Image: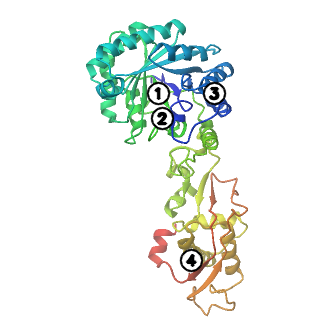
């Protein structure tokens, strides 16, 4: 099978930094660039040198110290921008000037206020000038997916003739559907003279949640560079997520027979570093790097995970640098996960004792969302000592759950022992609560409900 090589172009430090609240200073950019180098990306777009002295310095310092990947600087299609980018990249081992100019009618009319003819000439002139400063020149027709296709072909052909080595096709406002975007890449390959001499690149935004899907559609139609960011950060709804693109191609090799140079075991640490630097947390359900990406609460899922993690995980957490899967104790958890956590805490039960702990556990979990070790230990202690569930002492008079209440403290800090179970690929954990609550202990599930929930 042909294992075509896909170039990973990371623009976290440029387009990603344009996310509201995600700006980075020079030191933070340099630190993240070094992490991107460890991750194995092929191109780091280090910034927009004309934008500020800080951006210029960041590109300059990254170019001087990060030597393996290509270092790119962004420039509008004008002499001043191109010169500034060239100056910032002078110390780079592998520099690239990335020139862009809008080509859609709406941008030409309302933003740039220039004609098609002037746009064509400006693009050609800017690429020629960049080529005089740097052998590696990329051109992006901004808002390409809303550009008249015939005119887009003209522009792409002109910049290739002027010396561009990479032509990027941005879905700047996240407007395209995957089949449309793939068709656009295919059309360019069929109609543009000289297109076979350059690398076609994708740059897709996520306004309709399709940035990764569009990028992969472009790859299927012949694009061999993908522009993306860590955690998918970027303008508005963000860019295509680097970690999702890399792992989609790795997990679904049957559909995407392509290779990247990314060391996927560094994906999670890269995600965490970015979140630390920007102070913008990763959404819990974010694919690949969110805290719930390898967490399981439902009893049926936990049962499958305990028997074979492949039942509910299509990749190992270690393959992306996540330490382990987690079985989270909550109201959807089953007896198997509860029994495992009790064993990790040093307690083993016969079936009837486990039933008692489990029933009290489910009632508690209904109230506090996730049960932490300290709560579980108190339940275990009450059951082991024969205390009734109303907390008043004495026998329970033959009832499993007399209608009464017990007060359980919900600490603010996580209890010790949550990281136990080194031997199993999944460990069980909980979450800290915020206050004390009174828990009424009464029969919570019928036997049939226990069957459905309690695996």
Name the front one of labels 2 and 3.
3
* Residue at (60% x, 21% y) in the render: 69
Q: Are marks 2 and 4 in contact (CB under 8 Å)?
A: no
Residue 37, label in figure: 3
Number of on-image labels: 4
The label on residue 359 is 4
Camera sees residue 273: yes
Q: Are marks 1 and 2 in contact (CB under 8 Å)?
A: yes
Q: Which mark lies nearer to you, 4 or 3?
A: 3
| Mark 1 / mark 2, whichever is N-terminal | 1
**C-alpha gap between disc 1 and disc 2:** 9 Å
Of residues 390 and 168, which is closer to you in this image? 168
For label 1, the SS is strand
Q: Are marks 3 and 1 in contact (CB under 8 Å)?
A: no
Q: Secondary structure at mark 2?
A: helix
Q: Quadrant of residue 105?
A: top left
Q: Quadrant of the N terminus?
A: top left
């Amino acid at each position: 099978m042909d294992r075509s090589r896909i170039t990973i172009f990371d623009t976290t430090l440029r387009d990603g930094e344009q996310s509201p609240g995600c700006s980075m200073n020079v030191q933070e950019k340099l630190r993240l660039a070094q992490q991107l180098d460890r991750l194995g990306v092929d191109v780091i777009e280090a910034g927009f040198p004309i934008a500020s002295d800080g951006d210029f310095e960041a590109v300059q310092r990254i170019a001087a110290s990060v030597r393996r990947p290509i270092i790119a600087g962004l420039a509008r299609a004008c002499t001043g921008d191109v010169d500034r980018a060239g100056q910032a990249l002078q110390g780079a081992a592998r520099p690239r000037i990335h020139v862009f100019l809008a080509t859609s009618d709406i941008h030409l009319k309302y933003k740039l206020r220039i004609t098609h003819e002037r746009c064509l000439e400006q693009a050609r002139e800017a690429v020629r000038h960049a080529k005089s400063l740097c052998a590696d020149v990329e051109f992006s027709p901004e808002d390409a997916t809303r550009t008249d296709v015939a005119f887009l072909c003209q522009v792409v052909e002109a910049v290739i003739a002027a010396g561009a080595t990479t032509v990027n096709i941005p879905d700047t406002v996240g407007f395209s559907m995957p089949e449309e975007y793939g068709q656009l890449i295919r059309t360019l390959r069929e109609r543009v003279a000289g297109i076979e001499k350059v690398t076609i690149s994708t740059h897709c935004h996520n306004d309709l949640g399709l940035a990764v899907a569009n990028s992969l559609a472009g790859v299927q139609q012949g694009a061999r560079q993908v522009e993306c960011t860590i955690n998918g950060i970027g303008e508005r709804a963000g860019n295509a997520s680097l970690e999702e693109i890399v792992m989609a191609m790795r997990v679904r090799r049957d559909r995407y027979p392509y290779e990247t140079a990314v060391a996927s075991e560094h994906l999670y640490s890269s995600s965490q570093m970015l979140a630390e630097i920007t102070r913008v947390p990763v959404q819990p359900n974010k694919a690949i790097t969110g805290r719930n990406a390898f967490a399981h609460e439902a009893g049926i899922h936990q049962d499958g995970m305990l028997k074979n993690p492949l039942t509910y995980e299509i990749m190992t957490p270690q393959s992306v640098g996540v330490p382990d899967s987690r079985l989270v104790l909550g109201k959807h958890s089953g007896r198997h996960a509860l029994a495992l956590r009790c064993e990790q805490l040093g307690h083993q039960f016969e079936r009837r004792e486990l039933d008692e702990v489990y029933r009290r556990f489910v009632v508690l979990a209904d109230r506090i969302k996730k049960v932490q070790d300290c709560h579980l230990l108190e339940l275990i202690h009450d059951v082991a000592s024969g205390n009734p569930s109303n907390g008043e002492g004495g026998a329970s008079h033959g009832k499993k759950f007399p209608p009464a209440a017990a007060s359980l403290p919900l600490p603010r800090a996580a209890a010790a022992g949550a990281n136990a179970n080194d031997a199993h690929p999944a460990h069980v954990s909980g979450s800290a609560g915020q206050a004390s609550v009174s828990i009424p202990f009464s029969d919570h599930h019928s036997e049939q409900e226990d069957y459905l929930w309690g695996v």
